[in-house]
Amino acid sequence: MHVIKKDSRYMLFDNETFCLYRLNKIQGEKLYAVGDELVGELCQKISANKSLEPPRSGDVFTSRHASRLVLVISQICNLRCKYCYAQQGTYGQKSYPLMSFDTLKASVLKTLDLYPNGIDKIQFFGGEPLLNFELIKQSVPWIEQQFVSRNLVIPMFCMVTNGTLFTQEVHNFCNEHHLNVTISLDGNKEINDGNRVLAFGLGSTYDAVHKSMEIVSRNRTYDLMIEMTLTKSNIRQF
């Protein structure tokens, strides 16, 4: 259970059923103050009194259209970035590091059940998503077919990658399906390689990204973005 606050209004999100419930001001303030750990216990008492109110159509917390679906298709990474917030891409999990096609299909279909008017953007994330590139190749045509069969606009596809595993095959696929790419790069070679470290053996992540850029620069039709994490090293150099 998680309490969401928007201005002076409160909603309760049930992460098991994906349902949202309206809370009155007293309920919202009380649950928001105690934190997620105690919310479940208190909600049982509220529910027993049948005082949870479903959201109304058009409510600020409800929509039949999703702006973005993020799919964490890999919980492993070939880098060991010093500032990584996701335990080097694992998110603390040691099992099932790669998403299966069945899980991806279930995720997309569940989202379309909740948001039948479609999804603006589907993002492939990790870990390093290119460690599961086979899933991307499988899933993008399938997703396109699902949206066409529902008379929905095909979502924008995008991927956030560290750029070290980018190949001509990946480039060709991104061109074919207009899969936009965001590559992480923190600055010059000294700053980038100081924080973005290869997991196995010696080498330069900056040089690997530079090699990828040589591929990307040839006949690219998809959008390319660079994402930088600012640290004290960047500030000192500037």
Image (spheres, rainbow, N blue to C red):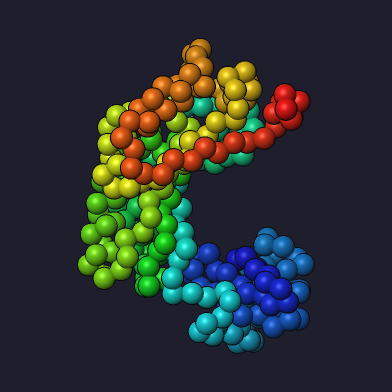
Considering the image in quadrants, where does the N terminus appear? Answer: bottom right
| In-image side of 137 versus 196 (left or right) | left
Q: 113 above or below 68? A: below
| In-image side of 133 versus 204 (left or right) | left
Q: Is residue 135 visible?
A: no
Locate residue 6: give its quadrant.
bottom right
Front one among 22 and 140: 140
Task: Where is residue 183? Give x, y as percent.
Answer: 48, 36
Front one among 238 and 32: 238
Q: Identify the residue at image location x=59%, y=85%.
A: 53
Q: 93 above or below 71? A: above
Task: Where is residue 164? Give x, y as percent.
Answer: 44, 26
Considering the image in quadrants, where does the C terminus appear? Answer: top right
Q: Identify the residue at image location x=48%, y=69%.
A: 17
Q: How many marks?
A: 0
Q: 180 above or below 189? A: below
Task: Where is residue 52? Give x, y as percent.
Answer: 61, 83
Q: Identify the residue at image location x=38%, y=51%.
A: 157
| In-image side of 202 versus 46 (left or right) | left
Q: 18 above or below 23? A: above
Q: Identify the residue at image location x=33%, y=42%.
A: 221
Locate residue 121: give its quadrant.
bottom left
Task: Where is residue 5? Give x, y as percent.
Answer: 68, 70
Front one among 211 and 159: 211
